[in-house]
Image: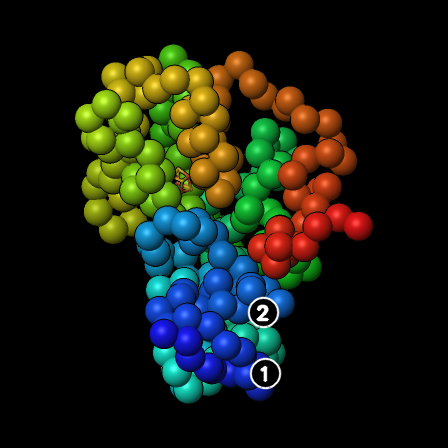
């Protein structure tokens, strides 16, 4: 059903139930995301796409459009709220962008650059999280993981549908596990897809390293904002 709502005061028309983050992008309003993967079910784990809907804060990936909604995206308060969440993601992990193989292709880095983030207002925690190096073709660098859970939900063994990544432990100690046997059965293109799916440099393919020259990497050549808004280089 076709409905109408407002985004930052502009009336937009869409189909009922379309995730607000996608309605916004289709109408030229960028909302940063990290866990949202277009075309895949909503995870709602990162909350970076926070907006205000009818006066209440909500994750815009997890809320479907309804007729008459009043959506605010670009207010100073909401920009600061989203920025705060991104700062918290940075201090909770170890993100040494200049030395990371995912630099230039990392969504967290791209979102931070778009926000002009140069530091965090919180103390860095520098967690010491054990890496998983046992698989033949995958490195799992847990200290870069932002726990978006994309890998857990969307990377499956192609024969059995079993999860290749899972979550162990609870609370602050929760971490991503890799089923090494299933990982070793992944064809190379599925490994590449998993690396691409991870919004940071936590899942890496062994033997690849820094394979794209600086200046040509995905978000250097074309910003995340432009990609989300579907703009093309002129
Ligand atoms: S390993 Fe990557 S995809 Fe998986 S939860 Fe961590 S950040 Fe997300």
Q: Earlier in the sequence, mark 2 or mark 1?
A: 1
In what element is the residue under mark 2? Answer: loop
Mark 1 crowd level (few <14, some 14–19, many ≥20, 10 Å Cα): few
Q: Is residue 114 left or right of residue 121?
A: right
* Residue sitting at x 57%, y 86%: 9
Ligand number 1: quarter of image: top left
- Residue that mark 1 sits on: 10
Looking at the rendered image, the quarter that the N terminus falls into is bottom left
Picture layout, residue 73 above or below residue 198: below
Quarter location, residue 213: top right
Q: Is mark 2 within 8 Å of ligand 1?
A: no
Q: Is mark 1 within 8 Å of ligand 1?
A: no
Nearest to the observer: residue 174 or residue 33: 33
Q: Residue furthest front?
A: 1
Badge number at residue 27: 2
Q: Position of residue 20 (x, y in %)?
A: 44, 69
Q: Position of residue 161 (x, y in %)?
A: 22, 31
* Residue sitting at x 41%, y 65%: 19
In what element is the residue under mark 1? Answer: strand
* Residue sitting at x 47%, y 65%: 21
Quarter location, residue 193: top left
Examine the rendering and report whether any part of residue 117 can be seen: no
Is the residue under label 1 in contact with that under label 2 (CB below 8 Å)?
yes
Nearest to the observer: residue 162 or residue 45: 162
* Residue sitting at x 66%, y 43%: 219
């Amino acid at each position: 059903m076709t409905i109408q709502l407002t985004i930052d005061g502009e009336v937009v028309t869409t189909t009922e139930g379309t995730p607000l983050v996608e309605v916004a992008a289709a109408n030229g309003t960028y909302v940063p995301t990290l866990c949202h993967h277009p075309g895949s079910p909503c995870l709602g784990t990162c909350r970076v796409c926070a907006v205000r809907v009818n006066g209440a804060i909500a994750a815009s990936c997890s809320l479907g459009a309804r007729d008459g909604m009043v959506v605010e995206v670009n207010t100073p308060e909401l920009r600061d709220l989203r920025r705060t969440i991104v700062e918290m993601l940075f201090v909770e992990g170890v993100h040494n962008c200049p030395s990371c193989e995912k630099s230039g292709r990392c969504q967290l880095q791209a979102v931070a650059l778009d926000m002009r983030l140069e530091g965090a207002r919180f103390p860095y925690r520098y967690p010491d999280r054990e890496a998983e190096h046992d698989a033949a073709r995958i490195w799992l660098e847990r200290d870069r993981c932002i726990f978006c859970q994309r890998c857990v939900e969307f990377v499956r063994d192609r024969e059995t549908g079993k999860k290749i990544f899972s979550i162990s432990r609870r609370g602050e100690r929760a971490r991503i596990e890799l089923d090494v046997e299933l990982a070793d059965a992944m064809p190379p293109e599925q490994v590449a897809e998993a690396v691409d799916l991870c919004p940071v440099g936590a899942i890496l393919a062994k033997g690849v390293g820094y394979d794209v020259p600086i200046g040509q990497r995905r978000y250097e050549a074309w910003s995340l904002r432009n990609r989300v808004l579907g703009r093309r280089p002129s």
